[in-house]
Amino acid sequence: MRRKLGNLCIFLGAVLLAAALLLLGYNCWDAARAGNAAEEILPALLDEMPDEPTVPDQPLGTPVEYLDEDTLTMTEAEIDGERYIGWLDIPAIELELPVMSEWSYSRLKTAPCRYSGTVRGEDLVLLGHNYTRHFGKLDRLRVGDEVLFTDMDGVVYRYEVAARDVLDADAVAEMTAGEYDLTLFTCDATGARRITVYCDMVK
């Protein structure tokens, strides 16, 4: 009886190990696929940008209540049936990524997405999966690191990391409060917390 029980435990252990290896393999494949997808889109996105930036009439720092609807609305480009609002460049972690206009779980498998807000409204919130070549390295950013966002009008907005935090998954208000000009967030390894990076615009 003990022998049979021992054999059963060995068998179950082998099954669990195999399942864990399969899951690890799938996660690695999925991360590589997502990185390649974003990398392939970026050149097409850059081709859609004007040769000369189209600068809004109202200067940066104009209070949101005085901005007209056209200024707040972000220009979009459509590539392969999806809409994009620009691209993100974070030199400290060697990251260059297209940014989709609206978020969904399926879109996050291709590129980071806008969660809420706008550049000109100074309350832009972007989220991405924690794939290594998406937002998986956000936790390596330090206060003072540069973050660049180029919109589809060709205007480059420069930011500096102002603060970092790890929030509960349901802490939506903290991420969308508008206290910072740009917020980036992603899941941690457990999926239960949100690694969050807050940035101030350099005007």
Image (cartoon, grey):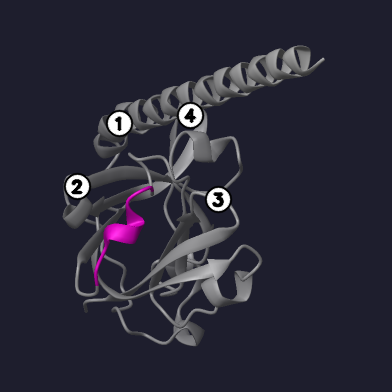
- The residue that disc 1 covers is 39
For marks 4 and 2, the one nearer the N-term is 4
Is the residue 63 above or below the residue 22 in the image? below
Q: CA distance from mark 4 to mark 2?
A: 22 Å
- The residue that disc 2 covers is 94
Q: CA distance from mark 3 to mark 2?
A: 24 Å
Q: Which range is magenta?
A: 136-142
- The residue that disc 3 covers is 190
The answer to whether the residues at label 4 and label 2 have Cβ atoms under 8 Å apart is: no
For marks 3 and 2, the one nearer the N-term is 2
User: For residue 156, what is the image quadrant?
Assistant: bottom left
Q: Within 10 angstroms of label 2, few (less than 14), some, or many (20 or more) residues?
A: few
* Quadrant location of the N terminus in the rendered image: top right
* Quadrant location of the C terminus in the rendered image: bottom left
Q: Is residue 190 left or right of residue 118?
A: right
- Between disc 3 and disc 2, the foreground one is 3
Q: CA distance from mark 1 to mark 2?
A: 13 Å
For marks 1 and 3, the one nearer the N-term is 1
Is the residue 157 above or below the residue 36 in the image? below
Residue 28: percent from left, percent from top? 42, 27
Name which residue lies at 18% across and 56% down. 92
| Residue 57 part of the magenta segment | no
User: For residue 164, what is the image quadrant?
Assistant: bottom left
